Structures are given as C-alpha cells and as structure tokens.
Image (tube, grey):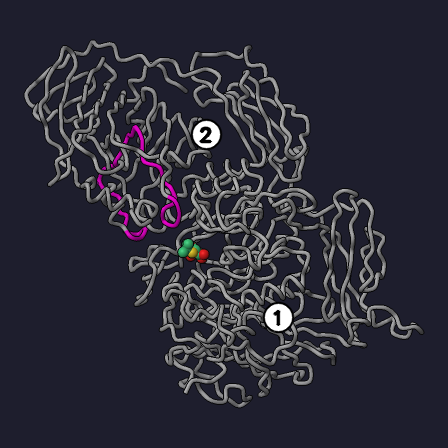
Amino acid sequence: MPSSYVEDPAPGHGSSAPRSAFRSDAPALSLGGSWRFLLSPAVDAAPDGIERDDFDDGDWADLAVPGHWQLGGHGSPAYTNVRYPFPVDPPHVPSDNPTGDHRLAFDLPDDWPDEPAVLRFDGIDSCGRVWLNGVELGVTKGSRLPAEFDVGPLLRPRGNLLAVRVHQWSAGSYLEDQDMWWLSGIFRDVTLLVRPAGGVQDFTVDAGYEHLTGRGTLRLDAESPDAGGPDAGGPDADGSHADSVVRITVPELGIVGLPAGRPVEVADVQPWSAEEPRLYEGEVHTATERVPVRIGFRTVTVEDGQLKVNGRRIVFHGVNRHEFHPESGRAVPREFAVADIELMKRHNVNAVRTSHYPPDSAFLDLCDTYGLWVIDESDLETHGFSELGWQGNPSDDPRWADAYLDRMRRMVERDKNHPSVVLWSLGNEAGTGRNLAAAAEWTHRRDPTRPLHYEGDTDCSYTDVHSRMYADHDEVDRIGQGIEGPERVRQRPFILCEFGHAMGNGPGGLLEYRDLFERHPRCQGGFVWEWIDHGIARRDAAGDAYFAYGGDFGEPLHDGNFVIDGLVHPDRAPSPALAEFAKVFEPVRITAAPDGALRVTNHYDVLSSAHLAFSWVLEEEGIEIAGGVLTVPPLAAGAGTELPLPELSGFPATGAESWLTVRAALAADTPWARAGHVVAWGQLPVTPKPATTAPAAGAAPAVTGTQLRLGPGVFHPGTGQLTALGGLPVEGPRLDLWRAPTDNDRGSDDPDETRWRAAGLHRLQHRLIGTELLGDTLVVRTRVAPPGLGFGMRADYHWSADQQRLRLRLEVEPEGTWPCTLPRLGVRMAVPAALGEAEWFGRGPGEAYADSRQAARIGRFTSTVDALQTPYVFPQENGNRIDLRWLRLTSADGAGLRVDGEPAFAFTARRWTSEHLDAATHTTDLEPGRTIVLNLDLAQNGLGSASCGPGVLPRHRLHPDRASLTLTFTSPDAEETPSR
Ligand code: IPT
C-alpha cells in the first residue's frame, strides 16, 4: 500500500505560512553537506524508524546535500519532454517509486539562542516527509518551492537528528511535467533559522515610481509580530506597542523607522530598471531583528496595449532559463548562477523567464543587482495531458485546486520583494481550467502591482498579456497589426514567451523577429528557448568526456536530444547562437547612413549612450591601419544621430579591400564586464574588393604518362580529377550538395532532412561525361545525381592556370524536376591532415549561415582546423565560415594552399566527412581521419528553427538553380604578393 500522502493531490502539510525569502541578523545554520543516504526501490521497501535516534544507518551511503541522488551514484536520470514516464492515472504513481531516505545528525553552535526556529527546505523533488528528533514535522510537495517547519522546541544543543524521506514520484509529479531531466532529492539548501520573538515574520515592500514627477512611493506592509493582526501596524493609543511595530529605514532616502502601513513619498528617486538597476539599501526592523533589504523603485503597467515600466515601453530580449549544471543538475552552485547572469549581460540578454518554476531565490537577488527583467513562473506544467487531449487535466479538476493555489502563493510570497520580477506567470503548458483562473484571481488580489502571464490562457480571460510560443514571423506580424488572435487579445501587449528554439545549430531568423519587435509597438520581444543545453557530463569507456542526453541512461521512454537546446553548451561555453543573439539584440545600432555618413541609434529602453565609448578602426584586408576615438554625443534612449565618417583619406592605401569598424564599448567597469567590453558594433565598406586578376592563361596543359599537368595542378587524365597541387596530394574537388543534417533540418512536420534523403542527396553518384581541352582550359563534364531517380545536376569544371595558380570555374545546372532545396552547393576536397592551421579574410570569427550571420564581421581570422568545429552535443553540420575572399590552410612547416574566391565563398574544414558527422550521435564518435575534408561552397541552406518552430524563411532557402563558383588555388609559397 502506498503511503496516502504521496498520492494526495493536496499540497503538503505541517509547514508554516509562506513568506518572503530573506536573511536577517538572526542566527542561521546551513545544514548542507554530507548526509547519510539510502535508496529504496519503493515506498514500502524503505526501512521503518529512520526518524529514531537509535536507527542504525551505518551501512548507508554518503550523499551531498543539496543534490540529486541520481547524480550522486544512486539510480539514473531520465529525460522526457511532454510525456509522463509513468501511466497517466492521476493522482496515482507507480508502486515502484524510488524513495531516498536522508539522515543528518547535527549540533547547534554554542551561541545558538533559546528562541523559536524554523527548518527551511528550499527545494525537495518531488515529495519529502520530514522528522526532527523523532517528531514528524510534515510533508512538502512543490519541488521548486520552499517549505518551512517550526522546530524551536524540538532542538537540542547536541545530537539533533534530521530525517527526510523523499519520494521520486508523488501526486505533485503530475504538476511537474516540465521539459527536463527527472531528478530527485533535496536539491536546494536546507537551513535552520532562528525566528526571534518580536522579530519580522514577513513583509512586503512596494516601491513605485511616478515617471511624470520622478517621485517614488515606498510602502512597507507587515504584521506586527506581537499583536498579530493586520491593523497592528501603528502604535496603540498609549504607544505601548510601539516596539513591536515593523519599520523600515533607508538612510540614503532619509527614511528612518517608517512604520508598516504608512506609505511615504520620496522626491527625485532614481528608478530601478534592468538597464540601470538602482537599488537603495535599507533595513526592515523590529526591536529584535534586522533584515537587510534592497529597494528598487519601479512601476509596471499595461497601458495603451503596451507593457510599460516607469512609463516606458520595454522590449524583452530574453531567454528561458532552466536551472542546470552538467554535474549537479538543478542543484546549481551560486557561482554558476553568477556565471549565467554575467554571460547574459555580456550578450545583451535583458530578460529571463524562469522556465518553468521559480529558480533558487539567490538567482533573483542577482537579477535585482545586475539588472534583468524577470517573468517569475510557478512550478507548474501538466503537458503530458495534451497526449490525452487534455482529458483529466488537473488544471480543471477541483481536487487539485489547493495545489494550484499553494504553488502560486508560495512563489509570490517568496519572491514579492524583488524589483526584477515584473510579471508573474501561472506556469507553462498546463492547458486551461478553473484552477488556473482561481490562481490568477488570487494573484491579482495579492499583488496588484504586477501583471500576470500564462501562455495557455490564449484569450487572456484571466491574464494580462497575450503570449505565444514559436509563432512564426508572419503570425507575429499579423498580431502586431492587430489582425490575429481572439478579439480580446488584440489590444494587449504581446510577447513570445518562447521563440528561436536554440537546439543544435540554430536558430536562424532572429533578425527578422527583431524587425517585428521594432515595427509593432505591441510586440514587446520574447524569450529564446532556451538558455542552456541540459547535457549531463559523462565519460565513455576510453575515458573521453561527453555530454549525455535522453536515452543515454537506458530510459525506456525518452525524448533523445530534445533537451539539448540552449544558447550555451552544458559547460556554459557560448554557442554561436549566443553570439548571434548578442549582435541581433545589441542596444546600439551602428550603420551606414545613405549619404555616406554614419548612423548611430540608441535602442536601449531607458539608458542613454553616455556610458559607452565609441572607437573606430580601419582595416585593409583585415589588417588594422588606422583607428581612433569617435565622438558621439550622448543619445537618449530611442534617439539616433548621423555623424561624418572619420577622416580616412590620409591613410596609406594599397588598394586592397578595406572596412571601417565602429565599436561601442563600456567606458567604465560594470559588475558584469570590464571597461572596453564591446556591446555593439557596425561595419562599413570603404574600399571595395579589387577585381581578381584571373591567372593569365599561360600554362598549357601537358600530358605526361599518367599525369595531366596544368600549372601547379596535376590531374588524372582519364577522370579529370585533381590529384596534386604544387606538390600537395589532394583529392577532388567534386560537387557536394550534402551536409550532416542539423536538429532544425530534422525538425517539423515536413522536415528538410526527410526530403533531402528521399531525393538521395546523401548518396549522389558522379558520372564523368568527358574531359576535353579547349585551348588552355581543361573542361571536365559530369552529371551528379541520386540513385533510382531521374533528376540530376550537370557540373562542369573549367580548369585554367598560370605557373603558380590554378583556377576552377564550376558551372552547375539542374536537370529534371528537383523536389527539394539543397543543403549546400559547392565542392568538397580532401587535403593532407597536416594542414591544420586556417587563416582567412572574410566573415568571422565564428560560424555563420544565411539566416544567422549578424555576428560574423569582415576581418582576418586564424584558427586551427580543430577549433573551427563547434562541439554541438549532438553532432551535426557546424563551423561554416562565410564570405571568404581567401583562405589559407597551412601546416606547421608552412606548406599548404590558398584559395581565392571570385568574389567569395564559404568553407568548412574538418577531420571527418559529412557522412561521419551525420552518423555520429555523441562528440566522442568523431574520430579524426587521414585527411582534412575541405568544403568550399557557394552557399548553404539557412538554419531556421524547425526543431520547434518555423523553418527556414523563404529568402534563406537554397534552391537548385543554375550557378557558378570560381575559385583559384595557389600554394602559399607561390603567392606573388604576400598579404601580410
Ligand atoms: C515548449 C515547452 O514550453 C518548453 O518547455 C519546451 O519543451 C519547448 O517546447 C521545446 O523545447 S512546448 C512545445 C509543444 C511548443
């Protein structure tokens, strides 16, 4: 028989009323550390009497708390997205319900006062039953929410025994179907806190900002600890209770001992915003307790169909953040929360949706400090019911009403004093129903200062903002025009609570979303799905490290690598998509003005550009030849100006292609980046690329035995294949149309990958039609086509040369009816493995694709071939560099080759083929081969976001068409004009 509390849809019991998360000057004892632990396969299999002092846990294991037992060597993680990994039979859970018993013996510090105290658990997944010194305190559910139990009278100076029985599954699991690993345990802090008599029980600081007058209003609400009633905010007629009143002091504002319940106006206050997170330090106090507080004045409103903070429209350039660490799961050490915030701020992320549960509250402290707009989301998702057509969804079942309210209440009470929290969210993907409506009603009443979000309330019948996930660009455009969606939502602010699915290589199309956020005042941005790849750090048999995803732990039901969809890799290394995000959503835009001037526009919500230092450099073929400071008058938020270009005429010019790069960098250090950190940049062409001089025909083809020589090239006379170049053995180049499909190629109802494979693009065959010498030109005519199908591509290679250079003009022409787009269009060749150093003039430094190329600037870059690879957790096409004027691949001894484009090309270079990349499922599957595979492309198809969302926009699709690619190959020692 399962224990009844486990399957009870009601919230836990025994805990005290929820209150804000604060730390006062009252003593506290962290109980984190090594605990005794035993995992049992079922509730009934767990031992009796673990709460007793004399219970012998000598043969138990040690486990770190906070932590998840599956990551501490007991049981295994499991990943499902939408589906519940157990039968949908609410509120029942499997009898095989892994149960983790935790025990900790502890002493109190010597100076621990004889006062009331609470035991606080910040997060137990999914259901915990708690005993202290043999006495049962109660049960907690709501994994990502705190629970406090009064323990004062139970404490002993020495030899306290805390026992916690945690069940992996509970009725609460039905409300916790978020897209993430199923991980159990006491995964957030456990703390013993003194609650002094006459201390601060709880308080609400409401700090509004009146933008027309610059006035702030500060109001503290708190119950007097002694009198206990809400009316006890002021002293009694005889003043006798004066000392029991809760008061606030903010020295900087001249507020001293302001009692609860008495609002005060403050002239000329500086408001809080994500861009200028001004906090006033203060203290909430009673005679016996002092609580440090940080106050941010701001007012959030919905007016004129727009979401405004302090009277200004704001735009979310946000991310959905799960709490994740590759070794410790949702037990995220503080330094990693700091790392997240610093990375976000450095990449122009200005908002976080706490998908889909409240984060550790320390994260919100950091958001207040560093400045991020936050949508704080309740710990609620019942997505698995969508598989049943939402039949039986708890959201509309009265048995779950208390649980819905309880979750919302515990979040709102915990987090209400954070200025960074500008919206509450009821949860995610929980369908709709009266329990949500009731939770909404409670929230509106409890906190009228913050609008409410929930995407599932599609007609805004109980929420305040219109929200969609993964709406394509056209839909967002129609929403912006007010011609899409139910009548009720058409005058609401609109946000994309999820967009730009960052799974694997992608998303493409962020720029086009930005344009919509700028075009339509009601379209107020969105939150990319998602911040981090949830890959779990593992090692293979050979000891090589990799990141695991769904299925890697033998789960019978799983959703594979769908959990690997972040802007940062599991180790928080930024993916190329984060660089793209930073560029697309840069707060200052530097562009060419029509009349040859420079245009600078401030896209901050509130900040002027005064904190930025502008500078310029002039680069000739990627080499800096001049530079200086650019004086830009401070621009108010939303303002723009035109400036003359810096004086460039006096600089020596070789006639090479040159570009002006203007950067806007932090003028002074900030908490998240040092002075000099570049927040925005723009580039303007100055001198165009000179016309390429084709190799003067001059080298005549000569056939000697089995070799056909043309300038530095050696060909096989029968096949027309290039076999050597200036002494380097090479294979190819041959037409190549294939790329290892990306997660986005693989996604959607009608995936590109399926079409490409059906068209046989992964197994093209090359037929030589013939070779012919036309004057000094070697022409190799081929037809490239898939087996079993009638369409194909004519590919003719026209080779000419002088003594040093070999030039290829590839002409392609589709024949028949092609059924699909092309992954890529270009040539592939194999070059010696020793050519491991790349240098190029073109766009870089990072990878770029047609619809994700904003972050790549024109310059001269170097990289090893190995470092060109982006280690996507699930291997796929990556590392493409675009708009190359030239590329050099060299070995340590300087041997190598150079490729020039007419005018440009893209390249990938890797130590394995696209076929190997395609077959690999983990990074450790990629083994260097005996050559470097070099692809030189005219183009690749865009990336899109079809793994969850719209595919490649029409203008970024690569269609089979007549095309020509011209490349000149030189061996570097033969270069006439060294370009260094
Ligand atoms: C959407 C979920 O809200 C999110 O948690 C995540 O699963 C995301 O998809 C995909 O990675 S729901 C989807 C059905 C649109």
Q: Which residue is mark 1?
A: 30
Whole-angstrom CA distance, mark 1 to mark 2, is 49 Å
Q: Which residue is mark 2?
A: 857
Name the outermost residue toward the right: 238
The part of the chain drawn in magenta is 921-950
Name the outermost residue toward the front: 487
Q: Quadrant of ligand 1?
A: bottom left
Image height of 141 relative to 791, above or below? below
- The amino acid at mark 1 is Ser
User: Residue 664: which quarter of the image?
Assistant: top right
Is label 1 or label 2 in front? Answer: 2
- Counting from the top left corner in percent of width and height, residue 824 is at 28, 34
Q: Nearer the viewer, residue 218 or 897?
A: 218
- The amino acid at mark 2 is Arg
Q: Secondary structure at mark 1?
A: strand
- Indicate left or right for 388 with 478 as reference: left
- Residue 669 part of the magenta segment: no
Mark linked to residue 676: none
Image height of 843 relative to 207, above or below? above
- Counting from the top left corner in percent of width and height, residue 325 is at 47, 58
Q: Which residue corresponds to the image point at 66% horizontal and 39% vertical from the top-left?
A: 606
Q: Secondary structure at mark 2?
A: strand
- Residue 932 part of the magenta segment: yes
Q: Is residue 534 visible?
A: no
